[in-house]
Amino acid sequence: MTKQQNERRIFELLASWAGLILVPNSIQQKNPPAPDIECQVQGFGSLAVELVALDAPNTRKRLQNMNATLDTWKLALKKWTTAEQKKLCAECNNVFLVLLISNEAGTRDRTELMESIQEQLLTKPSGFIGELYSPRELYDFGERLHGCQRVSVRRGNDITNGPRINAPSGGSWQMPQIQKIKEKLTAKTYHTSAPLELFAYSTHDEVDAHINSLSMIDECVRMYLPCSQFRRVRVFDSMFKAIKYSYP
């Protein structure tokens, strides 16, 4: 998705969790210094919304790396001949790949790993199931495989247009970036004639997982909202599809 498409998708989700009923086809997305969204809300009228993500930078990067895994398979596939690509596509049509890979492995690293996996699959007998690398190979080629600890090949009758790839990414909870709320309230000027609200959201790090996190958000909002262009701040937790804070 483009940046605008992603912002629209996020806004529509957040608006539904806030109980806002949008007038069909009323969403506008203008270039800065306009806010991200301008729309019409049933029973309210015009509304402008600026969006801000609160997840910690390393959390967002970790999830970005994880979500890019399937794309890196496709990037690596282009490096093979047409005949080899057809063979891989046919052989992997019902494949489910399970990977254990470093959170820090980015697009370039994952593309190199996928090329190695594809190279291995081209040498295996048709219908291969099991561990693609032995523990010794993983150890010997650890640097080349970018921290990969496992590549398991499974197959399923319900899988088509494979491979499907599971490359889970885990990390500890981190405090939401409250500074981002302050920056939106104090550092920018928005051009809009509609009442302006700030929609802050987390996609992974829960905004209220720490006993003080919501109180710190509240302190920030109460301090900087009165002198800002905004009339309200709403904070959402995407994991639980819920609004966690609204002021006033």
Image (tube, helix red, strand yellow):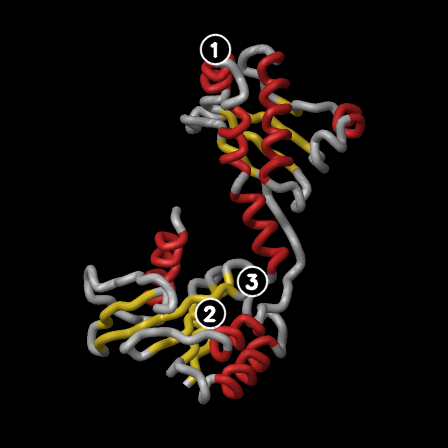
- Compare marks 2 and 1 and give the one earlier in the sequence: 1
Q: Amino acid at mark 2?
A: Ala
Q: Position of residue 151 (x, y in %)?
A: 64, 29
In the displayed structure image, the side of residue 230 where residue 45 appears, left or right: left
Q: Quadrant of residue 10?
A: bottom left
Q: CA distance from mark 2 to mark 3?
A: 10 Å
Report the residue marked by disc 3.
55
Q: What secondary structure is marked by label 3? A: loop
Residue wearing tag 1: 83
Which quarter of the rendered picture does the C terminus lie within? bottom left
The disc placed on residue 32 is none
Question: In terms of secondary structure, where does tag 1 sit?
Answer: helix
Q: Earlier in the sequence, mark 2 or mark 3?
A: 3
Q: Residues within 10 Å of mark 2 (few under 14, many from 20)?
A: many
Observer able to see residue 234: yes
Vertical side of 64 occupied by 200: above or below: below
